[in-house]
Amino acid sequence: LAMLGNRLVGNTLEQGVVFLPLLWLHAAFVDPAISLMLAQIYVAARALYPILYYFFFPGVTNNNNNLRRQSHAYIFSTMPGYAVNAYMMVKLYFALP
């Protein structure tokens, strides 16, 4: 559980440094309504991260039957964040003079 908290905070801080400035710039120069929708997608994906990481982190031993989990399902919470950031970068590139 300590590793989960460490990765949750670390991953959120890593992505937040990119996401927040892009969100503000996108809202100011492109479209505030779309920025709101993108922020909601991003926050929903961030909310899934601890759940998916806890249940599907590869290499974590299951206490019930000592099986090792071998899934990378937690990328379903990180990839939407990357997609939102990439979308805002591209839209800003074409919107700015």
Image (spheres, grey):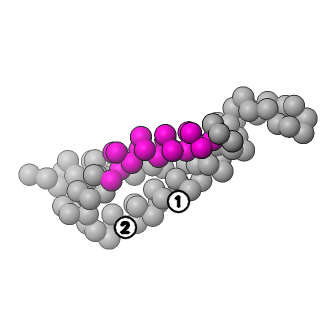
Indicate yes or no whether the magenta region holds residue 19: yes
Tell me which residue sits at (74%, 32%) in the image: 60
Mark 2 touches mark 1? (CB < 8 Å):
no
User: At 56% from the left edge and 39% from the top edge, which residue is drawn?
Assistant: 7
Identify the residue position indicated by label 2 in the image. Answer: 36
Q: Please name the amino acid that badge 2 sits on.
A: Leu
User: In the image, is 45 to the left or to the right of 30?
Assistant: right
Looking at the image, which is closer to me, 65 or 37?
Answer: 65
Single out the residue that lies furthest toward the front.
Answer: 2
Residue 71: name its quadrant.
Answer: top right
Mark 2 or mark 1: name the one nearer the start of the chain.
Answer: 2
The rendered magenta stretch, by its main secondary structure, is classed as: helix
Q: Splitting the image into 4 quarters, where does residue 24 fall? A: bottom left
Q: Give the amino acid at mark 1.
A: Ala
| Residue in view at x 49 percent, y 41 percent | 11
> What secondary structure is marked by label 2?
helix
Which type of secondary structure does the marked residue at label 1 adopt? helix
- Front-most of residues 28 and 6: 6
Tell me residue 13's x, y (percent).
43, 44
Q: Nearer the viewer, residue 92 or 5?
A: 5
Q: Is-magenta flag for residue 70?
A: no
Spatial separation of the CA atoms under disc 2 and disc 1: 12 Å
Q: Residues within 10 Å of mark 1 (few under 14, many from 20)?
A: some
From the viewer's perspective, tell me whether residue 97 is left or right of residue 30. left
Quick check: can you spot residue 79?
A: no
The magenta-colored residue range is: 4-20
**Residue on which disc 1 sits:** 44
Q: Position of residue 22 (x, y in %)?
A: 28, 52
Residue at left offset 72%, top offset 44%? 55
Question: Which label sits on residue 20?
Answer: none
In which quadrant will I find the N terminus? top right
Does 49 appear above or below 63?
Answer: below
